[in-house]
Image: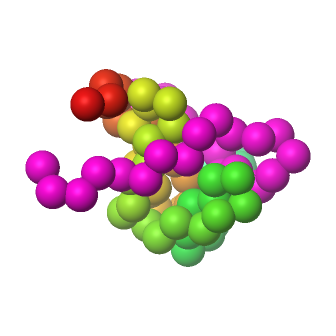
Amino acid sequence: MTGHPPRVGAPDPELKTSPIFDEYEEISLDLELEAGACYFNDVAYPIGQSVLSGSELLHCEERGIWMRRGEMRPE
């Protein structure tokens, strides 16, 4: 695999982080989420970007939300 996702650490409650959902979790349309990027600790990531928070792999999806995509163990 070429290129590893950036390590972003744990979400800081003082900084802007987009909502994080499980793959199987239903996302309520009432949330009115609409963004062209996902945020993690005040840093914007483009739709389609993956990041590693601890061992948890997160993928930036449409509407600017993070979806959990499993775990990655450090090499």
Name the magenta segment's main secondary structure.
loop
Above or below, comparing residue 75 to residue 30 in the picture:
above
Quick one: which residue is furthest to the bottom in this view?
36
Residue located at (60% from left, 68% from top): 44
Q: Is residue 29 left or right of residue 31?
A: left
**Pick the front one: 13 or 30:** 13
Quick one: which residue is furthest to the right in this view?
14
Q: Can residue 7 be seen at all in this image of the molecule?
A: yes
Above or below, comparing residue 44 to residue 60 in the picture:
below
Residue located at (43% from left, 53% from top): 6
Quick one: which residue is furthest to the left in this view?
1
Residue 34, image x, y percentages: 63, 66
Residue located at (36% from left, 51% from top): 5
Q: Can residue 32 be seen at all in this image of the molecule?
A: no
**Pick the front one: 63 or 7:** 7
Q: Is residue 67 left or right of residue 42?
A: left
Residue located at (65% from left, 45% from top): 19
Q: Is residue 15 left or right of residue 57?
A: right
Residue 42, image x, y percentages: 72, 61
Magenta part of the chain: 1-28
Residue 47, image x, y percentages: 44, 67
For residue 3, what is the image quadrant? Answer: bottom left
- Magenta-colored stretch includes residue 23: yes
